[in-house]
Each structure stands twice: as structure tokens, then as C-alpha cells.
Amino acid sequence: MNKKPLCALVIGHSQQSPGAVNKDSGLTEFSFNESLSIDIMAAVKNVDIIRVYRHQYRHLPEQINRLNPDLIISLHANAFNTQATGTEVLHYRHSTKGIALAQALQTNLVNALKLPDRGIKSRNRGGGGGYLLRYTHAPCVIAEPFFIDNNADLQTARTHIDQLVKAYADTIEQYAKTL
């Protein structure tokens, strides 16, 4: 019997360091994505999902690598100036498989939320998620489907939560078929 592929679904940030916050609702990046991850897990049927909580960022790649996943998606939400809008997915610039995963996820997220397509963005090993993207062994992407500090973007994500879950689930299932 073949084992199912494994996806590490990383909840961006932590309860102690919750990431970006919507100042009007008080909703944090961490709390939005923790709830989202539960829904994604329930929607994915042909891939095993393990949710990963960050303890210390510098140890996160090692923590994930010990799980030996086939793919990694780190759930985040962007923030800038309460006006910026759109969807983007980050990948490590030298990972061909990471680029393919980023493009598939970007397409599905843009189709789900209908926010401006900010494209996929490559990162080096430095800041902006580059450390995680570079030092994990499996293809890894960081998803930024909307700007949580933009009330309209947040409302779009909340209104289209089922489509957002499906975008992630479909990407995971589709990518796993290429393994």
C-alpha cells in the first residue's frame, strides 16, 4: 500500500508573536490562519496534512525537515499601509519545484479571492521568509493571499473563506499528483 504524500501546513507566526493585525477588528494573522488551517485539513482527502506551529523561527526549517514532508505551505497574510491590496506567493529563487508550487497556488488564490494579482515573488536566503524557503528540503512557499490590515481585503477573505480553503486544498491535491 502506498503512503499518501505529506504536506506541512505551517501556521505563520505564533500565539506569542501573532504577526500582522487588523486594527479595526483586532484579528491577527496567526488566529486567522490557525482557523483556516483546520478547514484546509478537513478539505484535503488524498494528502496527509500536518499542521506546524513555530516555536523559534531560526529552528523552523529544521523542525519541518524532521517531518520529511513532500511539500510545505506557510500560511500568512500581508500588511503594509491599510490601502495595499492583492495576492502573492513567495518561493525560493533556486527551487524549480517551489516555483511550480508557488505558481499553482497563486493562480488558485487569485481565482478564489479575485484580488489584484501581485504575482509570485522569489526570495533569497535572507529576510522576508527567505530563511524558511531556502533551508527546508521540500518545495516550500509562503502564501500572502490578502492584506489583513486592509478592511476590504479582510472582508473579501472572510466572505470567500470557502473558496480560499478550496484554493489551498486544490493546490495541495494537484501538486501531490506531480510527485
Image (cartoon, rainbow, N blue to C red):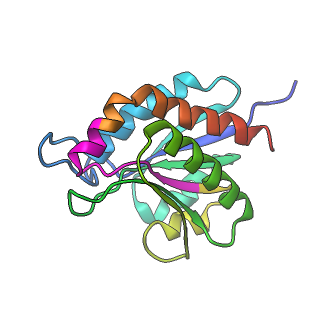
Residue bounds of the magenta highlight: 141-155
* For residue 64, side relative to residue 85 (left or right): right
Query: Image point 79% across, 30% down: which residue?
Result: 3
- The quarter of the picture where residue 103 lies is bottom right
For residue 100, side relative to residue 2 (left or right): left
Q: Position of residue 11 (x, y in %)?
A: 43, 45
Q: Give the residue furthest to the left.
A: 24
Please indicate whether residue 34 sits to the left or right of residue 170 in the image.
left
Q: Outermost residue, right direction? A: 1
Residue drawn at 33 percent across, 29 percent down: 159
| Left/right of residue 39 with respect to residue 157 in the rendered view | right
Quadrant in which the C terminus appears: top right
Q: Nearer the viewer, residue 97 or 86?
A: 86
Residue 113: percent from left, percent from top:
43, 39
Tell me if I can see residue 65 in this picture: no
How many numbered marks, from 0 up? 0
When the figure is inspected, residue 16 is found, relative to residue 158, above or below; the finding is: below
Identify which residue is drawn at 43% across, 69% down: 128
Residue 154: within the magenta? Answer: yes
The percent coordinates of residue 33 (x first, y second) are 38, 40
